Every structure is written in C-alpha cells, then in structure tokens.
Amino acid sequence: MRIIRLAIAASAVIALASCASISSLNADSLAQSGQLATQALMLSDNDVRTLSDKSCAQMDSENKVAPESSPYTQRLNKISKQLGDNINGVPVNYKVYITKDVNAWAMANGCVRVYSGLMDLMNDDEVRGVVGHEMGHVALGHTKKAMQVAYATSAARSVAASSSGMIASISGSQLGDLTEKFVNAQFSQSQETAADDYSFDTQKKKGYNPSGLVTAFQKLATIDGGKSGMLDSHPSSPARAKHIQDRIASGK
C-alpha cells in the first residue's frame, strides 16, 4: 500500500546528478545514464526474480523472523491457506517479521512478508484482505515495475547485466540500497485500486467475505492520520473503503 510514481526511468537516473550543473555533464556520462535507464527498463522477469531473491534474503537477515512455533506464524499459515500457495504460478513464501511497524509487502519471486504490528492491529479477515492486496501488486506486474524503478535509482544501477540477461554480483551496500528503495516504493492510484480489486475478487472467488478490506482501510486511516509507510496511499483509506463497500453492495 505504497504509491510508486513511475516516471520515465531515464529521467529518474539522470535526476541523480541534479546536484551538478548540466554543463558539467559530458556526453559520455549522459550516454551512460541513458544506458542504465534502458537497462533497468529491460530487466526481464528472471532478472526481477533474481533481484527479488537477493532483496528478500537481505530483509530476512535484517529482521526478526517469527519461528514456526510462533502464534503469528500459525495465524499467517491459516490465512495463507485461504489465499493460495502461488501467484500466477510462482510459489509463495509467507513469513512474519516481529516488529511494531504496520506494514506488509510482496515481491515478484513470491516472497510475502507481514509485520506483526499489522497483525496486532487487524483480525484475520482484515489481514487476508491486506495480504491479498499485496499479492495483487505481484500478479498485476506492479512489483516488477517497482523493482525496475528501484534498480534505476539505486546504487545497484552501476551493476551491468550480463549478455544472458542475468544480474551480475551486487555488493552488500548496493543490495541494501536497492532493497530499501523497493520496500519503501509507493504505487500509483490506479495500481492501488487495481490491487484492492484483485484482493476483493480473489476472496469472492474463494468463497470468503471481502468486507475485511473495508475495516482494514478504516483502521489504517486512524493511524498517524494515514500519513506514514503503507498508510501513505492515494486514494485515501476512507475512499478505498467506500470503493469496496460499493462493490459489496452491488454484488459485483
């Protein structure tokens, strides 16, 4: 539940040099920026999954992962069975991070992470709605675009892809920068609405009541005025709750 502004990648990369005057940029540096932007946009599905594998492993190493015996893990396991074990054929790997932060995200490689702070705030129906939303970003290709932009604007942009299209080795600092930009990425209004609808439709097809999305958005709207992290979304949480309420009322 974040808003990614997908500006043209070339502009995003060149903007990194905005602290220097345009006159100080020679033809070679401008050409290199353009090449890096093009490279980011040309990341294949396999490239994105490889970067996602690395980024997810990085996040797991930096956070406290709830063990299998944890009530949080047992809750998420129950919820995950309701959502399914794959996204467009990609196996899903669910884990909980023990933290007070209220957040959840998913990556193109099927890595789904839910923060215990969010699970403390919400009941199972609400968590299912939120996790379904994050899975929607993967299913609809939003996370691939998010990774492309994160790559174009991170230190990892200096790493060249090999002729086979696979991403070359990335240093720990480069990976950390890339991962931070991806996890903090924000999605556009149309992407957020599409992911909301994906969660709604998935739950309806599986026979679950999608009304948890409504109360999840209502709860999110009360935290810090809906201004931080996954809460900083457009349209606003109340507007998103109403959208789902309207779909429930219409039966469509």
Image (cartoon, rainbow, N blue to C red):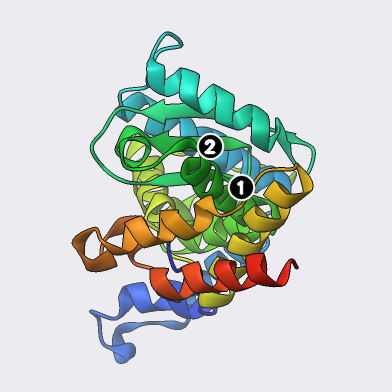
Look at the image and tell me whether residue 168 can be seen.
no
Q: Secondary structure at mark 1?
A: helix
Q: Amino acid at mark 2?
A: Val
Q: Position of residue 27 (x, y in %)?
A: 47, 82
Dot label at residue 112? 2
In the rendered structure, are the residues bearing label 2 and label 1 in contact, judged by CB atoms less than 8 Å apart? Answer: yes
Q: Report whether 246 appears left or right of 97.
A: right
Residue matched to label 1: 135
Residue 192 placement: quadrant: bottom right
- Camera-side residue of 60 and 211: 211
Q: Measured along the vertical axis of the image, is residue 146 above or below residue 61? A: below
Is disc 1 surrounded by few (<14), some (14 to 19) or many (20+) residues within 10 Å? many
Instruction: Identify the residue shown where x is 70% and y is 30%.
Output: 85
Q: Report whether 109 appears left or right of 31.
A: right
Residue farthest bottom in this picture: 23
Q: Measured along the vertical axis of the image, is residue 48 above or below residue 225? A: above
Instruction: Identify the residue shown where x is 30% and y is 27%.
Output: 98
Instruction: Identify the residue shown where x is 56% and y is 73%.
Output: 243
Look at the image and tell me whether residue 63 can be seen.
yes
Q: Position of residue 118 (x, y in %)?
A: 35, 41
Instruction: Identify the residue shown where x is 33% and y is 33%.
Output: 116
- Camera-side residue of 51 and 122: 122
Q: Position of residue 13 (x, y in %)?
A: 44, 72
Q: Position of residue 108 (x, y in %)?
A: 62, 45
Residue farthest top in this picture: 69
Q: Measured along the vertical axis of the image, is residue 1 above or below residue 4? A: above
Total of numbered circles in the picture? 2
Dot label at residue 31? none
